[in-house]
Image (cartoon, rainbow, N blue to C red):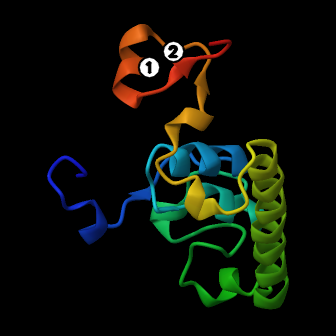
Amino acid sequence: LRDEGIRNRASIIAAGGTRCSADVVKAIALGADACYIGTAALLAVGCTLCGKCYTGKCPWGIATNDSKLSKRQNPDIAARKMANLIRAWGHEIEEMLGGMGLNSIESLRGNRDKLRAVGLSSTEMDILGVKHAGR
């Protein structure tokens, strides 16, 4: 997008596999503007990953339109749990940024120099534009 001169005309939202705050930091450093946290959010409000979302019969009342099942989920408690997740991740991200010598998430965006790879092939590192750990 930068090469085409349109980077500032598009927002990149990283989605899939965001399990923890470190994954958010990696995605932002690789150029994402934001991260979607679907499964992490579901887990925060009590999802057990039973795989019944698509049926509309979530036993925990999270992914359902069934009024009996939805009563199992207290929206106030779920909102507090979600807020706790976001707050905790925010604190963790601040700590990681501080460890990198950065004071804002905006200064991390696209800053691949702050990343190091472990367990990736040379091709993967070249594609991502990151160096091997220890270098």
Q: Determine whether, in the image, residue 4 is placed left or right of residue 61.
A: left
Q: Residue 96 in the image: x percent, y percent? A: 78, 47
Kind of residue at badge 2: Leu
Q: Determine whether, in the image, residue 99 is placed left or right of residue 15.
A: right
Residue at image location 45% in from the left, 10% down from the top: 121
Q: Which mark is residue 125?
A: 1
Q: Residue 31 in the image: x percent, y percent? A: 43, 50
Q: How crowded is mark 2: few (under 14 residues within 10 Å), some or many (20 or more)?
A: few
Tag 2 secondary structure: loop
Residue at image location 71% in from the left, 53% down from the top: 102
Let me know if residue 47 appears in the view.
Answer: yes
Q: Do the residues labelled 1 and 2 touch (CB within 8 Å)?
A: yes
Viewport quadrant of the C terminus: top right
Tell me the quarter of the picture where residue 132 sits. Answer: top right
Viewer-nearest residue: 90 or 68: 90
The label nearer to you, 1 versus 2, is 1
Q: Determine whether, in the image, residue 4 is placed left or right of residue 125.
A: left
Q: Determine whether, in the image, residue 54 is placed left or right of residue 134.
A: left
Q: Residue 36 in the image: x percent, y percent? A: 52, 62
Tell me the quarter of the picture where residue 9 sits. Answer: bottom left
Find disc 2 in the rendering and name its residue: 120
Viewer-nearest residue: 61 or 31: 31
Cα–Cα span, label 1 and label 2: 6 Å
